[in-house]
Image (cartoon, grey):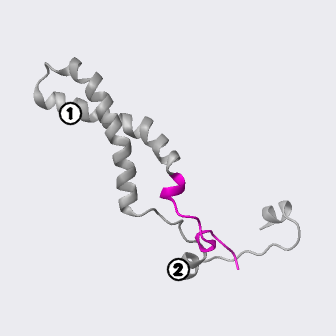
């Protein structure tokens, strides 16, 4: 308590919260419906697979089937996860995440 008092003005009040009281005071932000998340994923994976299919397939065409499919899928996942999906999610942010309600933020009584 002495350290807190040195950097605050006025009286310091601390109260530990646990259980249901803590859950009711701090709610997680709402998540998008699953169908919207699935559609956003599709919109990110489809162009990634099309572009990689066009440019990567000729290079790996002579490889054994399992190695070819594993390499292609790894490239699609990596490209979608680190390059395409951040762009898609940023573009669809307003549609994916509903407006935050006052209850979605942490509050203190």
Q: Residues within 10 Å of mark 2 (few under 14, many from 20)?
A: few
Compare residues 90 and 60 and report the one nearer the observer.
Answer: 90
**Quadrant where the image shows the N terminus:** bottom right
SS under mark 2: loop
Question: In the image, 39: left or right of 74?
Answer: right
Residue 103 versus residue 52 in the image, above or below:
below
* Mark 1 surroundings: few (<14), some (14-19) or many (≥20) residues within 10 A: few
Quadrant housing the C terminus: bottom right
Precedes in sequence: disc 1 or disc 2: 2
Residue at image position (60%, 70%) is 101
Q: Residue furthest left?
A: 64
Residues drawn in magenta: 93-109
Residue tagged 1: 70
Which x, y percent locates residue 77?
A: 32, 38
Instruction: Name the spot of residue 105 as percent of width and height, x first.
Output: 62, 68
In the image, 4 versus 9, the foreground residue is 9
Looking at the picture, tell me which residue is in the foreground, 3 or 103: 103
Q: Nearer the viewer, mark 1 or mark 2?
A: 1
For the residues labelled 1 and 2, the Cα–Cα distance comes to 46 Å
Residue 56 horizontal side relative to residue 109, left or right: left
The residue that disc 2 covers is: 19
Residue 34, by quadrant, is bottom left
Q: Is residue 94 magenta?
A: yes
- In the visual, does 108 lie left or right of 13? left
């Amino acid at each position: 308590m002495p350290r807190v008092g040195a950097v605050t003005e006025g009286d310091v009040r601390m109260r530990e919260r646990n259980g249901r009281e803590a859950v009711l005071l701090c709610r997680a932000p709402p998540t998008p419906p699953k169908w919207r998340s699935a559609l956003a994923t599709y919109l990110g994976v489809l162009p990634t697979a099309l572009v990689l299919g066009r440019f990567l397939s000729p290079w790996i065409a002579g490889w054994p089937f399992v190695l070819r499919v594993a390499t292609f899928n790894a490239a699609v996942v990596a490209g979608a996860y680190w390059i395409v999906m951040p762009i898609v999610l940023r573009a669809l942010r307003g549609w994916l995440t509903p407006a935050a309600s006052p209850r979605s933020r942490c509050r203190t009584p």
